[in-house]
Amino acid sequence: MSDSDNTNPLLGYYREYIGDPDRTVDVYVGFGLFFAGLSLVLVGVLVYIYSATLRPSSMSMYTVREISGIAGAVGLPVLLFGVVVLLPVDKRMLYVAGLGTLVCVAATGVFVWAYPSNWNVVGRVDYSAQGVGIYSLGIVLVIAATGAALVAHRVERATADVANGSDSESVTDPEISDEDVRADIERELDEAELSWGGVERQETRRLELDTSAVDDVDRDTLAGTATETRTESNTVEDAVGQLKGLQGGTVETASGGSTDDQAAALRELRERQNESDSEENSVVDRIRKLL
């Protein structure tokens, strides 16, 4: 590319907003059609506004409005066609946009031929419906091609951005070797305190018991050796006696089912104690007499 192309402002704008052009001529043609169409639309609007100041139903008014209609009808498809030329799209879109532009020009020719005597009139042959229908078909083709070109260009830009991002991420520093990466990983692992589930690691000892000697014990037999003994007693003395018996002493208790039985047992115990006391006294008296 020459130095003049580098200093051209149109090419600068094109590279900034669209990208690098495939051909320089496409940039010039696209911008030329765009600005030409924009100028024609503006001229059509301004001329139509000026026609409102003229005397109604005069030939001068019809002539000015005819010029306004021609400028606007041709300028709009030319403007859109310039956008399609500027975008780097498939040639099929260029063909569709060009065909639509030619259809619009043909409809404009119908307007020039029929206006004003046979355009939107009553009592005469009216060709306004035919002219508007042909123009609508052409402008739809141009708009469809322009929209498809814009969408395709946007998708292409997004795809290029993603590809450039992946390429930049895949580039590695050639000075870093696999040994350096492995050494960094090992250093970080040595300095890190690893834990399971967020629980701090503790240095503890685990005891392992050898239970092979008692593994052969019949647990069913041991379960049957334990017996449970329950006694029922109606007095506190029976409970105390049973407790002493469990501790190892032999305690004899006598209990009755009523208060009279308990009183009789108490009297019998006292009589036995009195008899033993009297026998001890008689033995002592005998010894004294002998002495």
Image (cartoon, helix red, strand yellow):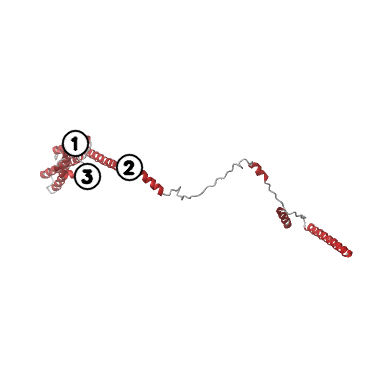
Identified at 33% across, 42% down, the residue is 177
Sequence-wise, the earlier of marks 2 and 3 is 3
Q: Amino acid at mark 1?
A: Gly
Up-down relation of residue 276 to residue 156 (above or below): below
The answer to whether residue 44 is seen in the rendering is no
Tell me the quarter of the picture where residue 273 sits: bottom right
* Residue at the spot of label 2: 177
Identified at 65% across, 43% down, the residue is 222
- Residue 68 at x, y percent in the picture: 14, 43
Identified at 39% across, 48% down, the residue is 188
Q: Is residue 216 left or right of residue 144?
A: right
* Residue at the spot of label 3: 17
Sequence-wise, the earlier of marks 3 and 1 is 3
Give the camera-side residue of 54 and 125: 54
| Marks 1 & 2, CB-CB < 8 Å contact | no
Mark 2 to mark 3 CA distance (whole Å): 41 Å
Element at label 3: helix
Q: Quadrant of the N terminus?
A: top left
Q: Is residue 207 left or right of residue 170?
A: right
Tell me the quarter of the picture where residue 274 sits: bottom right
Give the camera-side residue of 151 and 223: 223
